[in-house]
Amino acid sequence: MVQEALLRAASHPGLDLSRAKSYLSKIVVNLVTDLHRRSAKEDQLRAHASLVPSPQEDSELVEDRDLARQATQLVARMAPELRAILMLRRDGATWKQVGKILGEPPTKAEMRYRRAMRPLRQQLCIC
């Protein structure tokens, strides 16, 4: 700020040296005010930009939809008990809760889930 103020004062034609101190003070105050205004405007723009979803490429959207369609078909072919486990886990149920709902130990429910998911992941190429 000081350098900018000095440059502006030095380039000012006919600067009265007896008023240079007040002139420099006013320049610095104006520069700081401008900086704060720019910063506030940039913050508003950043906040607004963060609310706008970033555009996803068309090819990514097509891949996502295709993968979702494949996953839906594979899940539909699963045994009803495995589908139930999958849906419970999707909804945030713990293994203890899943076991209680299915009437089996949580470790058994988890083992069945993991065994069922392994081929599903392989078919969908999800590592």
Image (tube, rainbow, N blue to C red):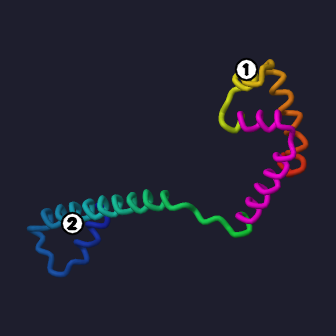
Residue in the image at 80% along x and 51% along y: 71
Left or right? Give the position of 83 relative to 28: right
Residue in the image at 89% along x and 34% along y: 115
Magenta stretch: give its range.
Answer: 61-88
Is 82 one of the magenta-colored residues? yes
Q: Amino acid at mark 1?
A: Lys
Q: Alpha-carbon neighbours of circle 1 within 10 Å: few (<14), some, or many (≥20)?
A: few
The answer to which of 41 and 85 lies nearer the viewer is 85
The answer to which of 124 and 53 lies nearer the viewer is 124
- Mark sitting on residue 27: 2
**Residue 24 found in image quarter:** bottom left
Distance between mark 1 and mark 2 Cα atoms? 73 Å
Residue in the image at 15% along x and 67% along y: 23
Q: Position of residue 107 (x, y in %)?
A: 81, 21
Considering the numbered disc 2 on the image, is that residue within a helix, a strand or a loop?
helix
**Residue 117 found in image quarter:** top right
Q: Earlier in the sequence, mark 1 or mark 2?
A: 2
Q: Alpha-carbon neighbours of circle 2 within 10 Å: few (<14), some, or many (≥20)?
A: some
Q: Position of residue 80 (x, y in %)?
A: 83, 37
Considering the numbered disc 1 on the image, is that residue within a helix, a strand or a loop?
helix
Quadrant where the image shows the N terminus: bottom left
- Mark sitting on residue 100: 1
User: Which secondary structure type mostly characterizes the magenta part of the structure?
Assistant: helix
